[in-house]
Amino acid sequence: MARMNSIPTETAALQTLRTVFGYEQFRPMQDEVVDQMINGGDALVLMPTGGGKSLCFQIPALVREGTAIVISPLIALMQDQVSALHQNGIKAAFLNSALTSQQAAEVEQQFFAGELDMLYVAPERLMMPRTLSMLEQCPIALFAIDEAHCVSQWGHDFRPEYIKLSILHERFPTVPRIALTATADEATRKEIIERLALDDAKIFNNGFDRPNIQYRISENSGNARDQLYRFIRNEHDGEAGIVYCLSRKRVDDTAAWLSRKGLRALPYHAGHNNDVRQQHQERFLREEGIIIVATIAFGMGIDKPDVRFVAHLNLPKSIEAYYQETGRAGRDGRPSNTWMSYGLQDVITLRQMQESSNANETFKRTERHKLDAMLGLCELTTCRRQALLRYFGDTLDEPCGNCDNCLTPPETWDATVAAQKALSCVHRTGQRFGVNYLIDVLRGSDADRIKQFTHDKISTYGIGKEHTAVEWRTLYRQLISHGLLSVDIDGHGGLRLTNESRPVLRGETQLHLRKMTKKHSAGKQRSKTPFGKAADSRFWDALRDKRKQLATEQGIAAYMIFHDATLMEMVDRRPQTLDQLGLISGIGAKKLEAYGKEFLSVIVEYESEASGDVNDSAAESIKLVCNGMKPLEIAHKRDLTLNTVYTHLANAIAQSEIELKDAVELDEKTLKLIRFEIEQSDDGKLKPVFDALAGEFDYGVLRCVKSDMTVGNN
Ligand code: ADP
Ligand code: ZN
C-alpha cells in the first residue's frame, strides 16, 4: 500500500476510506478518532458493537508510517480478520500460537522488510521478550488494543495478560495507542484508563444505543422451545442467529430438537472438544443461515455482520451479559431481533446459585444487585431500551418504539390483594415451602401432603380460587423478582418473606404488576426477504448465489466478499458499468477489480431475463385466480403448464398479494397435515413431503402451502 504522507492528513484518511474500503463518508466520531491517531495522540473509543470501531485504527494504520500492531484476545478469529483485510488489498498478518514456527518466521520476515500494514498479535505473544524487541527494530504506526474491557478484573471477560499491556507505554512512549471497547460502563472505563496508562488519551464516547436491534422479553409459560421455534420460522427462516442456553445439556437438546424440526442448528459449548467447536464456529461464520445454540462460552469477538437474531432460553445473570450477548445481532446495522423467554424456575435457580456461592460478601452483594437489575428489566412495563441505556449511564429522551413494551404496551393490574394472599400463605405455612405447594394451598387442593401438615385448616387455604395455577406462578415469580420474597439456599426452593414484603402485607403499599400476556407477543412480522417485489428477491438470491460461489472457491466467509448491505444496494441501483458498481458502498478498488465483472454479469443476465414477460405473465395468472378461476383452468386457458401457474401463485402468496385459499382448496385438517410434513422436512425440501403424502398432492400445491407458511400463516 502506497503511503500518502505527502497529502494533508484529512484528505489522506478520506481517500483511504473511499478507495480501500469503498465507503463514502465517515460515521460520526470515526473521523475525529482517525485524526487523533494520525496526529499521534492516544484514544479511548467507546462505541457500540457494529458502530465501526475497526476503521478507527485501520485507516490510521494505512496512513501512518510503519506497521500497526493490533492486540486482540481472539486468537480463533485472527485468521478471519486478516482474510477480510486481504480482500481489501491490505497487507496484514497475525502472530499467535496457532502458527507453526516456520509460519511465524515468515511473518516476522515480512515485518522486518516493512511489508506489513497491520500485524495482529495475541497479548501473551506480544509480552514475550523476543516479540517486544522485534517491535523495537522497525517503525510502528500505532498500537490498537481491541476488546479493552478485558483488563477489568470485575468484568466477565478478564484476561490477566491484558494488565501487562501498560508496558507498551513504557517501552514505546512515542507510539500512539488506541483502546477500543463496546462494553464499558463508568467503572470499567476508569479501570481501562488506569491499567493501560491512558491518562492522556482523548475519550470518544458514542453512546451505547443499538437502534436497529429490537428487544423482546416474554414469559415462559411452559412452552419456551415451541415459542422459540415459531419465532425463528416466522421471522428468521433461513437466517443466521444465536440461541443462548444456561447448561450444556440444554444446548445439546435444543440444537438437536431444532435440527429435527428442519432448522440448521449446531451446538457449541466448552464440553465439546476443540475440533468440534472450531468446526461449528467456522460453519456459523462461513455458511449462511446457520443457527448456533450455545452457552455463554460462545460469541466474544464474533464479528459476523449478519447475525439476524439472538435468542435467550434462559435468563442472563446481569444486564451487562444480556446487552453483550444481544449485541452480537445486527452489526451491519440492519434490523435485527433479540428474543428472550424466562420463567419462575429461572428466577429461582439464579437466586439460589448466587446465595449459595462461596464468594465473599461484597462480591455477592454486587452480583445480587446485578441480578435484581436484570429481573427489573424483565418485569418492566415501560420502554426496555430506555431502561437499558439508563443502566449504562446513557439516556434516550423518548420511548424507542422498537421494543416489545413500546410495540404492544403490556397491561398492568392492581395485584395488591392477590399479593397479600400469596405472601400471607408463605407466612401461615411457616416460610419453608416452595411455589407449587403454596399454590395448592391457595387453590384449596385436597392433596394428602396438605392434610398431613394440617394446612387445610389455615386461613389461606382455598382463598385463591379466582386465579389459575399459572397466574399464581407468574405472581410468585414477580414477587421474587421484585424482592418481596427470597429463595431458601438449601436448594428446595422454599420461600421466605423479606423486609420489603411487610408494607404490602400491612396494606401500606399498592402493587401494580405486569399482566400475563395471553398470547406470545410477536413484534411486526418480517417477510423472509427484505424486498417487496418477487422479482427483486429473485435478483437478490442470484447475487447471493454468486457471492457464495466466490466465497467457497476461496474458503472464506460470504460476508468477506460483500456484505448484505452492499448486495442490497445493487438490487436498488442496478449498476450497469464497473464505474457505477464502484460507487456502491462497500466496494473498494481491490474488490471492484476482483469481483466487479462477475457481479455485473449477474446483473446483466438477470435484467435480460426479467425484461421478458415473466412478470406480466404472473400478473395475468393472479388476475384470473382472483376472478375465481381454478389453477387447472388457468393453465388450459393460457396454454401454460400447471406447474408454471402454481409458481406464479406461490410467489404471489409469498409476497402477500393473494391468500392461500385463493390458490388451493384444502380443508383445515388436510392443511394441517401438509404443514406438519413441511415442518419435518430438512432444508425445506419438498420431495420428502411429496413422498410422505404418497404423492397425493401436486408439488405446486405444496409450494403454495409452503409460501403461505413463510409469511407466517401457521
Ligand atoms: P465494531 O468493531 O464497532 O463492532 P465494525 O468495525 O465491525 O464494528 O463495523 C461494523 C460494520 O460497519 C462493518 O460492516 C463495517 O464495514 C461498517 N462500517 C464501518 N464504518 C463505516 C462507514 N464509515 N461507512 C459504511 N460502513 C461502515
Ligand atoms: Zn421501547
Image (cartoon, rainbow, N blue to C red):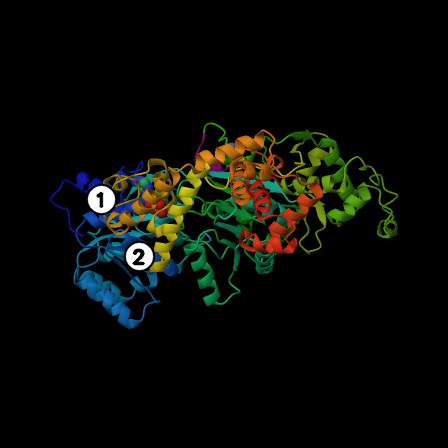
Rendered location of residue 512, percent (x, y): 66, 31
Graded by Cα atoms within 10 Å as few (under 14), some (14 to 19) or many (20 or more), the crowding at tag 2 reads some
Q: Quadrant of ligand 1?
A: top left
In front of the other: label 2 or label 1? 1
Q: What residue sits right under mark 1 in the picture?
A: 19
Placement of 290 over or under 210, stated as above or below: below
Rendered location of residue 412, percent (x, y): 65, 30
Residue type at mark 2: give it. Val
Depth check: give the residue in front, 140 or 638.
638
Q: Could you tell me which secondary element the residue under label 2 belongs to?
A: helix
Q: Could you tell me which secondary element the residue under label 1 belongs to?
A: helix
The residue sitting at 64% across, 30% down in the picture is: 411
Rendered location of residue 657, percent (x, y): 53, 33
Residue type at mark 1: give it. Thr
| Residue 393 magenta-highlighted | yes
Graded by Cα atoms within 10 Å as few (under 14), some (14 to 19) or many (20 or more), the crowding at tag 1 reads some
Q: Which residues are magenta?
A: 388-396
- 353 vs 238, left or right, is right
Rendered location of residue 559, percent (x, y): 37, 50
Corner quadrant of residue 551: bottom left
Q: What residue sits right under mark 2 in the picture?
A: 82
